[in-house]
Image (tube, coloured by chain):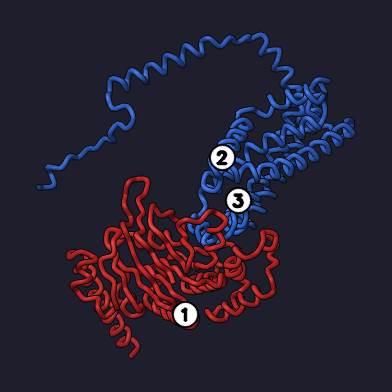
Amino acid sequence: MLELKNLSKTYKTGDTALSDVTLSIPKGQILGLIGPSGAGKSTLIRCINRLVEPSSGKVMLGDVDLAQLGKADLRRQRRRIGMIFQEYSLVERLTVMENVLSGRLGYVPFWRSFFRKYPAADVQRAYQLLDRVGLLDHADKRADALSGGQRQRVGIARALAQEPELLLVDEPTASLDPKTSRQIMRLLTEICAERGLPAIVNIHDVPLAQQFMQRIVGLRAGAVVFDGSPAALTQGALTQIYGEEDWNAMRNGDLEQADAEEDAKNRLAELVQ
Amino acid sequence: MSAQSYPTSWKRPAQIVKDPRWRIALQVGIVIYLILAISTIDVNWTRVYEGLERGQRFIMGFLQPDFTSRWRDISQGLVESLTMTLTSTVVGVAISIPIGIGAARNIAPGWIYAICRSIIAVSRALQEIIIAIFLVAMFGFGPFAGFLTLSFATIGFIAKLLADDIEEIDATQVEAIRSTGASWWQVVNYAVQPQVMPRLIGLSLYRLDINFRESAVIGIVGAGGIGATLNTAIDRYEYDSAGAILLIVIAIVMVAEYGSSYLRKFLQ
């Protein structure tokens, strides 16, 4: 479905963000992209819909090489790729409905989007998607009136309104609490399974990635250093991705946090009694 | 280390001129320059004494403002000024919006950016009075010259502040709308406009009351409106009518000020 061939990106400052990445994602697969910050995860997914221009290499979506497209063709191809962002990136002062309908912008002429006169099928679909993510009653609220988890649901509905063939998901849970994170990940994986949608998910939370992803790719300094199933993600592999010190620190941090949460839960339970 | 050995006094280190000799020399130099500069001002004290009497009549006129005897001129001037203010603000803002969008580096291509920024620079560099004198010479006395002056001045003000505001918007919202396959116009309509609209409305209201104040000033150089009426009244030594005009201007500016600040608060 999506094939990256020798994709490289060097920024003007001389920093190499990606070097020679080759990946292939079949239809329906949910791929988790893990790696330390600065490894090039964000650059990789932004090179696919060309919010960042790749320096060299091919991005094949079906039969189309996205890296070679001119402006108008690029806009047409972007409709096929839905994107979900870390900070939700909703337009805060627009209503929830407008945010969802903005997923249709690539399909409608300017006057329709300007007067908010979307085709009936688009409106119906937007309502259906809002219902799917559980926000049907919030359609007329302004986006900045919603909580973090609700905003991310609107972000998902906006991406789906594009009727995409591929989802790019950039740190979907980085701004959310652990419980909401799991709900959002569950919703995402369910939706991908329902539609057979392939997805690339940038994620820095390794346990969360192992729980929800079908395949994991580890990126380090712009190069793929691991590619396999979550079960194959051993301590050795993680050390290779994150470097020894960082991985041990992260793991200890996670353990400590889990202990602390457990402790807090027990105390609360005692208080209740 | 025991507590006694820490220093007990602290002086703020010099921030700009590090060398104390330079610092003293600079301070002495400024004082000497000030004394010399003031000594060159030539004050004609007998003229000041004569002027005091005139000033007193002016103030007396203020204390007994005469609204009635020149009311026709005053009301005509007021209507002219208000018309000029409203039309020039509407036209000025309408022209400013495309220029402001073009002058925002983050959404406009380089050559459009350069053109729009230079239009803004020209509009801001020329003071209202200078433009008014020029336009009065071109189009003759009257409110039309005033209308053009204020529209021109509005462009520099609104377009610059709008452009600066657009440059500070949240880029991720723009990125999100772009990633849906939206065109440039759709990006402006969906990701930029909602972020800058409240400020644009606030600025326009603010400009409305600036334009009214300016209309009183540029009237003095012949661009019509209440300023022209005021000028005539002073030329005729009718300080009581002039006082009435000034009081009306102050009242209207205050009403506009409170009205616009109330509206801006409501919009946030």
Callouts 2 and 1 in the same chain: no
Of B152 and B231, which appears nearest the observer? Answer: B152
Q: Are marks 2 and 1 in contact (CB under 8 Å)?
A: no
Q: Which tag, 2 or 3, sits closer to the chain's start?
A: 2
The residue labelled by disc 2 is: B113
Q: Residue at x 31, y 68 (%)?
A: A34
Task: In the picture, one chain is red; tell me its letter.
Answer: A
The residue labelled by disc 3 is: B199
Numbered circles on residues, count: 3
Q: CA distance from mark 2 to mark 3?
A: 21 Å
Q: Is residue B33 above or below residue A249?
A: above
Q: Residue at x 33, y 61 (%)?
A: A21
Amino acid on which disc 2 is placed: Tyr
Q: Are marks 3 and 1 in contact (CB under 8 Å)?
A: no
Residue B157 shown left or right of residue A200 in the figure: right
Residue B144 shown left or right of residue B38 in the figure: right
Marked residue chain, label 3: B
The residue labelled by disc 1 is: A196
In the rendered structure, the colour chosen for chain B is: blue
